[in-house]
Image (spheres, grey):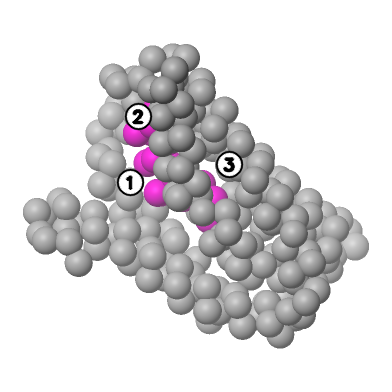
Amino acid sequence: MLEDQGLLLNQFFTLWAMLDPIGHLPLFLGATEELARQERRRAAALAVVIAFCILIFFGVAGQFLLHAMGISLLSFQIAGGIILLLFSISMVLGEPRSGASSPDEPGNNALRVAIYPLATPIIAGPGSMLAIIILTDNHRFTLPEQVVTYGVLAAVLTLMLVVFLLGNAIGRIIGHGGANVIRRIMGVILAALSVNLIVSALAQWLKLPPI
């Protein structure tokens, strides 16, 4: 029983650290700055559901697919880091668009933002994908243990959704200008994180000391 509880806590804190619901709130506010309140809530719910599906897919088939395609985890990490870097640059240098959806395409902005960048690469990014692949390794964990891992993942993402939904109140407090400032600051931080992903993978590949 104690071993099961220890495994459960280890998985929870590992996924919490990788998904970082609190730390991703400013990124959520920055990415959804152009959306109205109702659209922002819809984008949050859609993003969490889509990210959950993506991570479940990688947990079930990711290890097999990467191996079958001859793709190393380091290559996957570098590719994910590059995608994050490109998005972070757009956060820093791009101009936010107006807040409402076009009349002939209601809700399309919420779905678009929910898919990219919220669901991926912000929530289901290279780090969280690698984490779920490792936590559901077929060589280390039985099927019941993997099912428990998916349950823990669902719990962490539910907490993330709650945090994102509270973003509406925070957004009203900081206003449009504050959200714009947060967007650019978090873009710089995300750029540094993405560079760290790329450099750490290259350092591991070249057997260099960590930076």
The residue at the point 41 percent across, 22 percent down is 2
Q: Is any atom of residue 113 visible in this view?
A: yes
Q: Which residue corresponds to mark 3?
A: 156
**Left or right placement of residue 58 versus residue 202 in this view:** right
User: Of tags 2 and 3, which is closer to the observer?
Assistant: 3
Quadrant including the N terminus: top left
Disc 1 and disc 3 in contact, CB within 8 angstroms: no
**Residue positioned most to the top:** 143
Residue at the spot of label 2? 63
- Secondary structure at badge 3 equals helix
Q: Nearer the viewer, residue 102 or 134?
A: 134
Q: Does residue 180 sit above or below 42 in this rendering?
A: below
Q: Position of residue 81 (x, y in %)?
A: 37, 58
Instruction: Point out the tag, 1 or 3, that comes first from the N-terminus.
Output: 1
Dot 3 amino acid type: Val
Q: Quadrant of residue 85?
A: bottom left
Question: Label 1, on which residue?
Answer: 76
**Disc 1 on helix, strand or loop?**
helix
Q: What secondary structure is the magenta-colored segment mainly?
A: helix
What amino acid type is highlighted by mark number 1? Phe
Asked if residue 132 is among those painted magenta in the image, a careful observer would answer yes
49 relative position to 195: left or right: right
Label 3 Cα crowd, 10 Å radius (few <14 / some 14-19 / many 20+): some
Outermost residue, front side: 2
Q: Which residues are magenta?
A: 122-136
